[in-house]
Image (cartoon, rainbow, N blue to C red):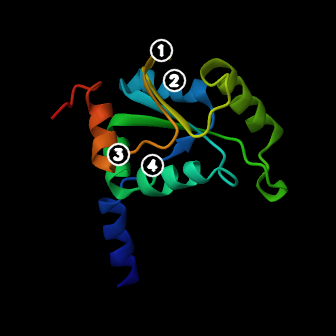
Amino acid sequence: MKLLIFTLFLFVAKPVTWLGDFSKAQAEASASHKLIVINFSGSDWCGPCIRLRKEILESDKFNDFAADKLVLVRADFPRQKKNQLSKEQVKLNEALADKYNPDGKFPFTLLVDEHGKVLTEWDGYPNESTDQFIDQIKAFTNDSH
């Protein structure tokens, strides 16, 4: 019975992966003709970042939409020692911040195309529902209904 439930879960839940390497995300977006969402976050110190992640970016509605339409990238900048990232990941995040978030805003979320061109951005916590957030992204996709 547990196996049946687990198997059903696999078919219902669409896996969503947040990448840490923008070049890999671009390659995936290029191959699949998807847009890229980049989220700059302070996962262990930034209240609005945590709220954005929990209420919108990790919601079932967003994950269902993103699974088919988006490549997701998170550039996290944790402060607590226990949450420190690898030196390689820190370098990747800093390089991405140099390019897209030089002012160090948190949370800061961007929608970019497969070439890295910024289509729209959200500075801070977006004061909107998950549906409204998705609708803003849909405006840039072929799936605007």
Q: Earlier in the sequence, mark 1 or mark 2?
A: 2
Q: Quadrant of the C terminus?
A: top left
Pointer 4: residues within 10 angstroms few (<14), some, or many (20+)?
some
Mark 2, residue position: 26
Tell me whether circle 1 and circle 2 mark residues in contact (CB < 8 Å). yes
Q: Nearer the viewer, mark 2 or mark 4?
A: 4
Question: Residue, x 27% and y 32% (percent of image)?
Answer: 138
Where disc 1 sits, the SS reads loop
Q: Nearer the viewer, mark 1 or mark 3?
A: 3
Most distant residue in the bottom direction:
1
Q: Position of residue 75 (x, y in %)?
A: 63, 37
Name the kind of residue labelled 2 in the image.
Gln
* Quadrant housing residue 93: top right
- The Cα atoms of the two marked residues, 3 and 2, are separated by 27 Å
| Residue 57 - label | 4
Which of disc 1 and disc 4 is earlier in sequence?
Answer: 4
